[in-house]
Image: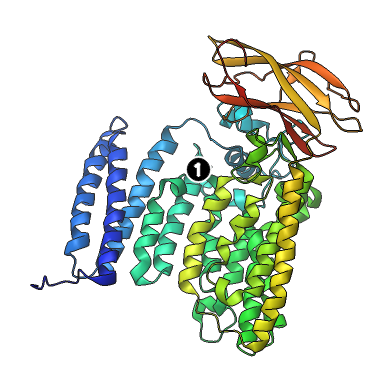
Amino acid sequence: MPRSGFDLSGTRLAERAGWLLVWFGVLAAGITLWHFWWHDPVVAASGPLLVGAALGGMAWSWLTPSPRARVFQVTSTAAAALAALLPQVLVIATRPFYVTDSAAFEDVGGRALLHGENPYTVSMRAAARLLNVPNRYWTYTIDGGHVAHTSYPAGSFLLDVPAMVLGLGHNVVDFTDLVAWVVTGILIVALLPTSLRWLGALLLLSPVLVTMGTDAAFLPFLVLAAWRWDRFGVAGAGVARWIGPVALGLACAVKQMPWFFLPFLVIGVAMEARGRGERWAPLAGRYVAVTGIAFAAVNLPFILWNPLAWARGSVLPLVDPLVADGQGVVSLATHGITGGVDLTLLSVAGAAAYATTIAAFAVWYPVLKRLWPLLLPVAFFFATRSLSSYFIDLVPVALVAAASVSAAPAAGGDGRRLRVRGAGLVAAIALVAVSLTALSFTRAPLQLQVLSVTTSSAGRTLDTVTVRVTNDTGGVVVPHFMVNTGNNPNGFLTTAGGRTVVLRAHRSATLTLVAPAHTVAPQVDAHWLMEAYTVSPAALSTSPLVVWAPRAPH
């Protein structure tokens, strides 16, 4: 076979194909940019220029003597960053509103701070002006209300303040998050081995990650925390000797999701120290201390400013009873399959599932050392709120963690005996999680039956729903009703007079409920249902699925 002058075999062939896919992503971004030609002449020219560069880059992927050449990888990564950035800049710049309440709250909180006000005590009424049909974007609570105050640690809005100081006024949080994601993508490329850097560039271009929302703000820090985490405290490890807990503390200072990483990393650091024959407790304690110091450096001023307000905002997602949502097992209830769910039991099941993953990591450490970030979605899968972002966020972190740590030392005879014993503990905790999950779906307190509906705007808007409600419990319940049409909820339905619905034990009532304004009706022949939330017991009850017909459900 004639020699071509460069390697087209084995792993290098796979790398070339990977970089070709990166340039294909650049091509797709250029085509997207072309649709914004109307914005201004610069954008009109950028689209075809990006398309032309992508075509040349795809050819370069095959023609370069080595796909590991520095110039090729740097240029390809820069093109990917530009392709991720430009179309989204135009989307954000031309969109008049935020699309999440968290972004609107961060905007209000950051501007309040610049005016000398405490973001944790300032009213969030101004957030309504930053959302199109605000009711569709609130995070609702099971007591019939919605979150109306800052609900994240202080880093969430502090990261937006510099852009505000520089004068950026429109959708500033979205722009900050976009920059954070591009920085994350570049970090991933830089931290991965040379042969795998195309994976980082490909993730940088992934549409589901580019548009991931406010979670992008903590990802640069979390990626750094996962990089070479097993070198913490190791002499000669360079920056990896100390950067892990600092980065984790900063990630935890932005949102609550990174909090769940701490037990894994502390256990891992302890196991590594033990494997090196060192005292593991002082090193693990130092990791926790440094993480806490980095977290406090961001949040301490606000803790001192108003401790109760800060605590109420920073731990809200973990302790406040929010309505069920997400792509985990809770969707069996929200999609009308089980008739409801006991939210308290499912929350305990989620905690047991999280404990199972931690125990499994400790027991099978040599096997799971590279894979542990992928254990976290197991716990989130059992949560009452298992949003897609909880799963998506972990992929970039898992990639860096798996590719940057060293192999775990093989366990000796004592280790094998401990694993056998630990496996029983893991199985027991897992059984608790599964059993509580199954039980939670058998304890809906109410029965609901949709009797009729009224609509307006040629059937496009839902106005009222008449529903029959039966209390199956032995106590008084106060239900709060919501319609689930597959769209973002518009809020809770109310009685015509706005009175609170109170159902005594084993009693039934027929209620005509008024939907919030702009509640979109389901599509013809689509399934929908009614939901009822109660605080005591903390539960969701649903009607059977209803097929939407132009006149009435059947």
Q: Please provide percent x and percent y for residue 168.
A: 48, 41
Q: Could you tell whether 435 is left or right of 363 in the image?
A: right
| Residue pictured at 70% horizontal, 60% vertical | 430
User: Dot 1, how many residues are within 10 Å of its Cα: few (below 14), some (14-19), or many (20+)?
Assistant: many
From this viewpoint, which residue is outermost toward the left?
A: 2
Residue at 38% from the left image edge and 61% from the top image edge? 199
80 displayed left or right of 228: left
Q: Quadrant of residue 120?
A: top right
Disc 1 target residue: 174
Residue sitting at the far bottom = 277
The quadrant of the rendering that contains the N terminus is bottom left
Res. 234 in view: yes
Amino acid at pointer 1: Asp
- Residue 102 in the image: state x and y as whole percent: 61, 41
Q: Residue at x 45, y 70 (%)?
A: 403
Q: Is mark 1 on a helix, strand or loop?
A: helix
As rendered, which of 301 and 175 lies closer to the eye? 175
Relative height, residue 278 to residue 259 (above, below):
below
Residue 227, how many percent across, how many down?
51, 70
